[in-house]
Image (cartoon, rainbow, N blue to C red):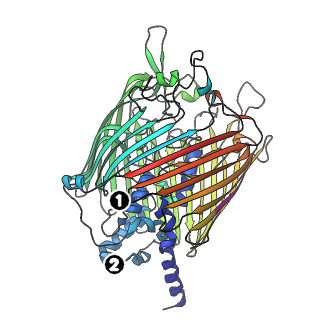
Amino acid sequence: MKINEIISALAFLCLLSPVAVNAQEITGEPPANVEQQLEDVTAANEDVETEDDGYLQQLHHFLKEPINLNYADAGLLEQLNILSPLQIANLLSYRKLLGNFINIYELQAIPLWNFDLIRRIRPYITVSQKTEVFLSLRKRLKNGGSSLLIRTSRVLEKSKGYLLDSSEAKNYYPGSPQKVLVRYKYRSGNLLQYGFTAEKDAGEQFFRGSQKQGFDFYSAHFFVRNSGAIKTLAIGDFSVNMGQGLTQWQSLAFNKGAEITNIKRQSEILSPYNSAGEIEFNRGIGITLQKHHWETTLFTSYRKVDASIYTTELNNDEFVSSLQTSGYHRTKSEIGGRHAEGMFSAGGNLSYSNEKLHIGANAVHYNLEHTISKVDFLYNIYALSGKRAGNYSIDYSYTYNNMHLFGETAIDEHLNKAFVSGLLVNTDSKVAMSFLYRNISKGYQSLYANAFTENTRPTNESGFYSGITITPSTYIRIDAYADFFHFPWLKYRADAPTSGNDYMLQFFYGNKKIELTCRYRYENKPINYNPYDLYLNPVVSRPKQALRTQLNYRFNNTFTIRSRFELLWVDKKGSEPQNGFLTYLDLIYKPILRPFSGNIRLSYFETGGYESRIYAFENDVLYAYSIPVFFDKGYRYYINFKYKMNRKLSFWARFSQTVYLDKNDMGSGLDFIKGNKKSEIKLQVIYIL
């Protein structure tokens, strides 16, 4: 054997060692690449953190019950959100040609699978002989496991909304400042699950006032996979994900980042929903039937959604100016909009798939109780309106050797068009490239779509994206992308058609002890900029540049330190530039075979204002995470602690505090806090029934 082959084999063994995956196995924390993607999603959604923790729940489930590569199908492998379509296809072809895997080391022989990929996927997979599968519904209902999660949190400093005199104030928070989540879930492998979720947000009442029924939000689901001809059956609350996100995509989806294969949406059409978010789901029944290469899905849903209602003076007709997405029901206006709009939706999919080709037809139609009529702004001319809406599309994919072509072509109720098409290419296991073109008309509207776009929703945009990943050696990975986009009509905070671009270059080095990431990103997206209060808002470029370095160092099996240093420049050569700076240091303590673990972080930040804000992912209790927005000047710290009392009972606790150094109050409106500190405490318990 040649010396380089020996070195490669030894490196592979190191990457697959238990120590390398210790962090996820103990706490269920998401991998570093997922943390970065969640940061990017929060930034793209204008600081709104998603409450959809379904993906984190699924990853943790695969830690406890790893995917058996000898029997997994493409749909199950797609749920990881780590493998590209080409990597999945090559694994299935390798298994079909050579039979089942004998051990995990065979993965390095699969075309397009490299050490970096295997290292990232290793905690979630296994290779073994087929274990017993409970095919009957009765056995699935009997041989699974169930858990009960209870989580509560609150900000210790009371904001203005809690301090106002309720007998005098017209607008205040009548409920307690605690946020409470209760979740029960039963699961039998990946074949059956059911459960319920109940949540109360801070400021909402509980078993009194407007919430005499207790929690503000209730959700329940029953979900079955692979039962005869039934591929999936969903009753209660469920998500629908079709095509490339132009018609409907309700689960978490990533966009631009170091993972260039995320340009393609991959998911089952029906997925169980048991998150605390109150917006992105259906409530009703859905079923997917499969026979040979054909698959059909049908679903129907009716639910009440939050909306801003107004009544005309002329004839007292009721209209909806906007659908509310915050999920808060604290003040009179928020409570007044709770479940104000009735929404009926129905749709389906018919598709044909084989080893190389997939083609599908998708449709979803909505009927609303009240007519939507937006506020009369120019950027709302093409906004969703009326009582009816619908989206219809054809999606496709084709694999040829090391190329994978995919896309979706859609129209809406008024025949406005949308088109997304991409190409994934692997020259070999060391180089992967991706390309995506989208062209979505300014009139195209969709309620719950989420395609690969610069906009939050797919509308009013054209653009071209290209990305590349190079892994020149076992421990080095280089990622880069360039994206050029154009908005042919006005947008919120952009009173003219605009064009922009986005570039990123990232270097990663990782071995058993050290992980080093260096990233540079440049973004130029024109917005309104009117510091002199001109009659018309000038639309100008405000380019943003960011430089980040992150280092993770594992001292031993117990202690790890992690640090980040980030600089940000906004309109560096403009008339009003802003700079931002963030640094933090983590100490992570995760002893093996001990009932307790924890981590501590201290952050310091200093920015010129909100435009130069910086985001940073924070570890939290299991299934939760926090991505605060850092701006102005101050420091922040948090402490996480986990204690596993026994095999059935585990506790988590978290305390965090932000201290501002240059101001004596924070927030606005009812969220105004007098003082320069904001502290939060969070407690969670999980009991395995």
**Numbered circles on residues, count:** 2
- Asked whether residue 92 appears in the rendered view, the answer is yes
Label 1 element class = helix
The x and y percentages for residue 499 are 63, 43
Q: Which image quarter: residue 474? A: bottom right
Disc 2 residue crowd, few under 14, some 14–19, many 20+, Cα 10 Å: few
Q: Is residue 333 above or below residue 257?
A: above
582 in relation to 71, above or below: above
Q: Which residues are magenta?
A: 562-574
Secondary structure beneath label 2: loop
Q: Main secondary structure of the magenta part?
A: strand
To which residue does mark 2 refer? 102
Q: Quadrant of residue 69?
A: bottom left
Residue 82 lies, in percent from the top left, at 46, 61
Instruction: Please indicate, yes or no, whether residue 429 appears anywhere in the rendered image.
Output: no
The one nearer the camera, 590 or 665, is 590
Q: Earlier in the sequence, mark 2 or mark 1?
A: 1
Instruction: Indicate left or right for 233 with 303 as reference.
Output: left
Image coordinates for residue 566, horizontal then vertical, percent: 70, 55
The quarter holding residue 105 reads bottom left
As for residue 85 lying within the magenta part, the answer is no
